[in-house]
Amino acid sequence: MEKDKYSSQKKYLAKTKKQLRVWVDAEKYERLKDVVKKNDTSIYALVNKYIEEYLKVNS
């Protein structure tokens, strides 16, 4: 069996990060993907920025 080349990265992330998953309407997701790409960013960056701003306002 071939060893997962990302296993050490996965172990590290499992200790330091938490995964967030949401179900989004397929059409909305595609629109979001297009807008994010046009703004030269990523959905990952967008979500993390939102979380930071939300915590600043609500903590």
Image: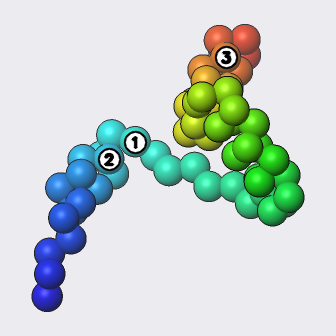
Image quadrant holding the N terminus, namely bottom left
Residue at screen point 74% across, 60% down: 23
Few, some or many C-alpha atoms within 10 Å of disc 3 (few <14, some 14-19, many ≥20)? Answer: few
Residue at screen point 65% across, 37% down: 37
- Secondary structure category for the residue under label 1: loop
Dot label at residue 35: none
Q: Which residue is mark 1?
A: 17
Q: Which residue is mark 2?
A: 13
Residue at screen point 65% across, 12% down: 56
Q: Tell me if I can see residue 51 in this picture.
A: no
Q: Is residue 38 left or right of residue 20?
A: right
Cα gap from disc 1 to disc 2, whole angstroms: 5 Å
Sequence-earlier tag: 2 or 3: 2
* Residue 3 % position (x, y): 14, 75
Q: Quadrant of residue 25?
A: bottom right
Q: Tell me if I can see residue 57 in this picture.
A: yes
**Callout 1, which amino acid?**
Lys
Q: Which residue is mark 3?
A: 53
* Residue 39 % position (x, y): 67, 27
- Secondary structure category for the residue under label 3: helix
Few, some or many C-alpha atoms within 10 Å of disc 2 (few <14, some 14-19, many ≥20)? Answer: few
Image quadrant holding the C terminus, namely top right
Considering every residue shown, the one lying at the far bottom of the view is 1
**Callout 3, which amino acid?**
Glu
- Secondary structure category for the residue under label 2: helix
Compared to residue 5, the image places residue 19 above or below, namely: above
**Callout 2, which amino acid?**
Leu
Cα gap from disc 1 to disc 3, whole angstroms: 18 Å
